[in-house]
Image (tube, grey):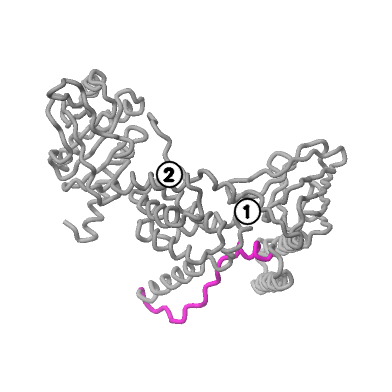
């Protein structure tokens, strides 16, 4: 694939500041710096890393240390650590999760059983965190043993009840701690019983609809969406991904509606920025046709529309990106192309006949185009059967390369155009089209699919998926009763 321009990414200037230290001048609420002393029996003279989570896919390293021969080490710094869930990596693929609230504490454990042998001093958050892990680990081992041995169901039920009682008591005891919020965030919402008896298929459908609706409505109940510490955990990102992947219909209107509802609940500046970023970046790069309309909505409403959240560079780049995307959204009439065909005559998009038009943007010098063009031409019989016209558009303005490419790949049966226009008075060549900013051509090849009115119904469809897309589109039209 020939890439001319890196697609816009909203992870731009200023956003990374969410992950950074928040400083305060109030000594009553904060103690500058951090001092964390650790001892892990079983390690010796190894490098350790202290990093906080930034969502579920990134970690931000805040300090490094080196253990001595007995496994002692110290993380220390003069700047505050942002609060959240951290990991201490002490060997390849081995790490400990710890909570950073108080930033002056110590701990000791070993490599044989880090959780059960853990001891903390001066960290109520981590004492509660590890006591929960220890107790739940033991109880689930007992439960699993009973299940494997197929013991009396009443015994299994008793263990489950004991687990629930322990959890409730633990939450009540530690309700003032962040760890309580953290653990609760891993729990799914509990769905109340369905009040109606299920007697037939209609009742069954109503039951499943009730479960889905309740679950979706209460999906974020166990996450404090206004506590910015959740940005520095894996849980907020995972919840967002599951919600928008599994519970939201992947259509622009549904995505926009659910994003707006969710963001009405979020007032905390950093969490709001993070959630806006995650939703926007998901649908900026989604491979689902049409969801870039959700990205355009997010950009207009929450970037350009909330400038206090972002720096001027990000806002300007978002505004420019939306300017390119909006005329190319599904349902829009494609911007007109003015080209010259192989005989020197004018060729426009509007002049192409057919029930459908494929606009195939390519570069004769692009290696990927050389792989995909034969696949395109191999579908000539299918195109004819469906009254599909193909307009192949070279974005490179080199006549010799263009005509050689057409000949080599036997493209004479389709419409071929190039953006070179001889001036009748001067004889000089003129160019009309800005392919990047008018058609979002940052790589080649790219295919737009148009209906008979030259409205966009699909874009950036892979060459070998054209027939699948046409079938899907026609079936969808039938479902909607559109001829």
Crowd rating for badge 2 (residues with CA inside 10 Å; few <14, some 14–19, many 20+): some
* Residue 337 sits in quarter: top left
**Highlighted magenta segment, given as a residue range:** 180-201
Q: Nearer the viewer, residue 350 or 312?
A: 312
Q: Position of residue 239 (x, y in %)?
A: 53, 58
Q: Nearer the viewer, residue 362 or 152?
A: 362
Crowd rating for badge 1 (residues with CA inside 10 Å; few <14, some 14–19, many 20+): many
Which residue is the extreme one toward the right?
70
At 61% across and 49% down in the image, what residue appears? 19
Q: Which residue is mark 2?
A: 317
The answer to whether mark 1 and mark 2 are in CB contact below 8 A is no
At 75% across and 61% down in the image, what residue appears? 125
Q: Is residue 383 above or below residue 241?
A: above
* Residue 181 sits in quarter: bottom right
Q: Which residue is mark 1?
A: 232
Element marked by disc 2: helix
Main SS type for the magenta part? loop
Circle nearer the N terminus (1, 2) = 1
State the mark number for residue 278: none
Q: Nearer the viewer, residue 345 or 283?
A: 345
Residue 49 seen in the figure? yes
Asked if the stretch drawn in magenta spans residue 249, the answer is no
Q: Position of residue 80 (x, y in %)?
A: 72, 51
Residue 155 seen in the figure? no
Q: Is residue 57 above or below residue 297?
A: above
Q: Position of residue 435 (x, y in %)?
A: 30, 35
At 32% across and 41% down in the image, what residue appears? 460
At 22% across and 26% down in the image, what residue appears? 430
Q: Position of residue 162 (x, y in %)?
A: 70, 72
Left or right of residue 164, residue 263 in this image: left
Q: Is residue 314 above or below residue 397?
A: below
């Amino acid at each position: 694939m020939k890439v001319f321009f890196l697609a816009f990414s909203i992870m731009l200037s200023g956003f990374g500041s969410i992950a950074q230290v928040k400083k305060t001048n109030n000594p009553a609420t904060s103690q500058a710096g951090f001092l964390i002393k650790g001892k892990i029996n079983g390690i010796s003279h190894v490098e350790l890393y202290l990093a906080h989570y930034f969502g579920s896919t990134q970690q931000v390293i805040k300090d490094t240390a080196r253990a001595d021969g007995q496994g002692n080490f110290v993380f220390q710094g003069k700047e505050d650590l942002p609060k959240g869930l951290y990991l201490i990596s002490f060997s390849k693929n081995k790490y400990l999760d710890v909570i950073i609230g108080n930033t002056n504490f110590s701990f000791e454990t070993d490599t044989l059983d880090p959780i059960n042998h853990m001891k903390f001093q001066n960290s109520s958050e981590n004492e509660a965190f590890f006591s929960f892990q220890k107790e739940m680990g033991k109880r689930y081992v007992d439960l699993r043993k009973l299940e494997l041995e197929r013991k009396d169901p009443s015994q299994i039920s008793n263990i489950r009840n004991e687990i629930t009682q322990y959890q409730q008591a633990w939450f009540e005891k530690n309700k003032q701690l962040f760890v309580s919020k953290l653990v609760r965030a891993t729990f799914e919402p509990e769905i109340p019983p369905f009040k109606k008896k299920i007697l037939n298929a209609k009742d069954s459908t109503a039951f499943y609809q009730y479960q889905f609706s309740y679950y979706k409505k209460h999906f974020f109940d166990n996450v404090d969406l206004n506590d910015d510490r959740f940005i520095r955990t894996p849980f907020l990102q995972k919840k967002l991904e599951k919600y928008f992947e599994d519970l939201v219909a992947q259509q622009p209107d549904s995505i926009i509606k659910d994003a707006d509802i969710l963001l009405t609940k979020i007032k905390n500046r950093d969490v709001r920025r993070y959630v806006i970023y995650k939703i926007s970046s998901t649908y900026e790069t989604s491979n689902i046709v049409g969801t870039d309309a959700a990205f355009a909505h997010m950009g207009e409403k929450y970037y350009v529309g909330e400038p206090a959240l972002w720096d001027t560079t990000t806002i300007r780049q978002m505004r420019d990106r939306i300017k390119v995307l909006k005329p190319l959204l599904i349902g829009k009439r494609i911007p007109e192309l003015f080209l010259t065909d192989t005989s020197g005559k004018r060729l426009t998009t509007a002049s192409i006949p057919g029930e459908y038009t494929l606009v195939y943007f390519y570069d004769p010098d692009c290696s990927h185009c050389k792989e995909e063009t034969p696949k395109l031409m191999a579908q000539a019989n299918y195109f004819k059967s469906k009254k599909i016209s193909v307009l192949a558009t070279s974005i490179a303005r080199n006549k010799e390369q263009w005509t050689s490419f057409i000949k080599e790949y036997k493209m004479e049966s389709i419409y071929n155009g190039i953006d070179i226009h001889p001036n009748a008075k001067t004889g000089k060549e003129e160019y009309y089209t800005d392919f990047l900013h008018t058609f979002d051509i940052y790589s080649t090849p790219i295919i737009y699919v148009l209906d008979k009115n030259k409205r966009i119904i699909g874009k950036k469809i892979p060459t070998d998926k054209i027939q699948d897309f046409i079938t899907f589109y026609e079936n969808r039209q039938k479902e909607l009763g559109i001829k």
